[in-house]
Image (tube, rainbow, N blue to C red):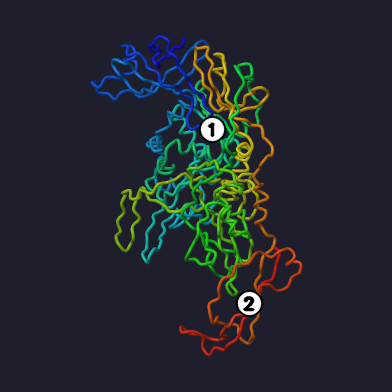
Amino acid sequence: MIRIVHKSGEALDLAPGTQLEIERTNPFFNEYGEQSLPITLPPTEKNRKLLNHPDDLAGISKPTQRTDVSIQAGVFFSSCRQAILTGNRREGIETSFYLQTGAFYEKIQDVKLSTIFENKVISFTSVQAAITFVRNLMVTRDDRFDCFPVIVDDGTLNALGENGTDGYRRLYNDEARTKTIDDKTISLDPGYYITPFIRANHLLEEIFAWFGYTMADNFFTETAPFKDMVFLNNTMDTIMKAEIRYSQIVPDCMVKTILDVYRYLFNCEFIPDEINRKINIVLFNDILNESPEVDLTGSLIKEYTVEHPETFRQLKLTATLADYNPTGSSSNTRSGNIIRNPSSSGSNEQEETFQSLIDLLAKYPKAEYNPINGQFTRSGFKGLDQVVQRVGYITMDYMAEEEFEPETKEVPIVWPLMSSTETTGGNRPSAASLTPVIGKSRALNSIIVMDADTDEDTDESVDEETLSPMLCFVGKASNYHFGTILNYSAEGSRLWNYTLSFNGPDGLFETFWRKYDLLLRNSFMGIQADLLLSESQKATLSGYRKILLKGQQLLPDKIKYIPGERSIMEATFLTTKLYQPVSEARSEADRIAGYSSAYYWEVNYERSNSNYTRYAFDEEPSTIFYDPPTAAQYLLGGKYHQRTYKVQFYTTSSSSGPRDPVPGTLTVWLEPRRK
């Protein structure tokens, strides 16, 4: 016999013969958690009182919509959330119940981060004390925050200054500064463009604590670089009121959005332990590697049915790139712009957008990949000047080339871009030059005042810019911290085995999604089975761990049951065996390796008149992009891609052009060199 016990300890009245049909779902395959079909409670005075009279409009308080209850039936016990759907004085109270993952999902469904962090503030005695706190995040580890430079549209947050007395870098804006924009001078008090970044684990802990849970140790708390990972923010006046207000440095989104970032980036799920009030973060790969925890063959009433899919599928991972274009150049670039997604003509006027790496590499098969900044580029020459064009990023969407229908995981995140500037004469960016780029900054605590207009300051909030979730790893140099979404330092040293990008040998697909993609391509056939579960099985059977059925390892999809009733109910499972012929996405290591050449072109030239060193082209040279040299070309040596230009040689010039020009030619060619 089933009992539904209100949080007050009193049992709700049930109609005779009440049955509660519940569906336990696998959160890896379903957007909703474990829940019941609606039932109708009799409109007794006891039920009406316990549920705050949901059928009565005469009261002054809003009717109860959700309440905590427990479901008991013999050895079956589960805490859950009760949802009041309708109330009718004669017909009764329609209600349904959310259990385990369903109860947790229901709690977080409509809660904003701003609600959780509205009143969470760290106060300081002065702005200078706040500056010191943020700067010391680079000196002593803090479980809550970190600090490193990030480029925004009008400057750099946490820009680094010279070394302090302790040997660590100062923050450039720890003293008053000025900026010049459109010939106007902006006065900046100490503290502007300084902001801490909240650690992702700290954000999760605060979220779960608000709902009454703790977070169990997990992959992200124990594995570098995830245990130091942060959510970026673009608030340029965070500390100008001598405080850090959490609501100004966390993303402007729902709690569910933050959890979806994790779900769709790392193929994990948040599993509540209602007894111990803990949240466990479970990786799909770990579940797949486990042995089945129970054999349900003995509970099978008749032969199961195999559902054959119309087509097998493949995985597609997609997100948004930061709406900003970082600058950067190669050390041997004499001139030329680096632009985002250039047209095939090399013109800066018409730019293309490549959403996926497949599209980019189909058009630019000889593009070169830089694992330090995650950029794909192609190199060309305009006369003597080398021009490097950025044509894409490693963070573009992932999907293999096969003609399978995609199952799309759309991550509610914005990828930062990575900016790198190389030192003169070197082949690597300098240590301070590898910096995330996140787009527009926002001011929430002040208005920056132009000296030419007024000398007064104001505390009015003026910027409604929305902050999307942006994740970033934290690297540590000898006396400062730096941010990156990749796994190489600016000097080219490997830092760790993970990147925050879909593509690449250490990317999210290879690390967290390849096994899932294998099952999409070669398995995940549906199994329908009629089961007679014991009360103990109803209480303990996992909704996401593998089971054994007639010797086959299966993953649960949906399991239906009725507590307290001996009843045959339907369950669906998914196969995990890889069926022949096995289709597998190409290795990312193999794919990316083809876009890293060991050779490059060096430009050389010859003047028709050696008496002159200065010259001007008769006509502006066009930019021509060349594939990198091959190994055979390097071994053979010699001159390649030779072109001759008409020029005017001269000794002196004026604003109108060369004086006493002498016509001649300039012959330019390329020679292969090894990097």
In-front residue for pair 463/519? 519
Circle nearer the N terminus (2, 1): 1
Residue drawn at x 55%, y 23% is 571
Residue 163, given in percent of the width and then of the height, sits at 54, 55
Report if the CB atoms under discs 2 and 1 are less than 8 Å apart. Answer: no
Q: Is residue 214 visible?
A: yes
Quarter location, residue 549: top right
267 up-or-down from 481: above or below:
above
Query: What amino acid type is highlighted by mark number 2?
Result: Arg
- The residue wearing badge 1 is 29
* Cα gap from disc 2 to disc 1, whole angstroms: 60 Å
Q: Tag 2, which secondary structure?
A: strand
602 up-or-down from 539: above or below:
below
In-front residue for pair 165/636? 636
Q: Residue furthest left?
A: 58
Residue drawn at x 45%, y 23% is 98
* In the displayed structure image, the side of residue 115 where residue 539 appears, left or right: right
In-front residue for pair 649/456? 649
* In the displayed structure image, the side of residue 365 where residue 270 appears, left or right: left
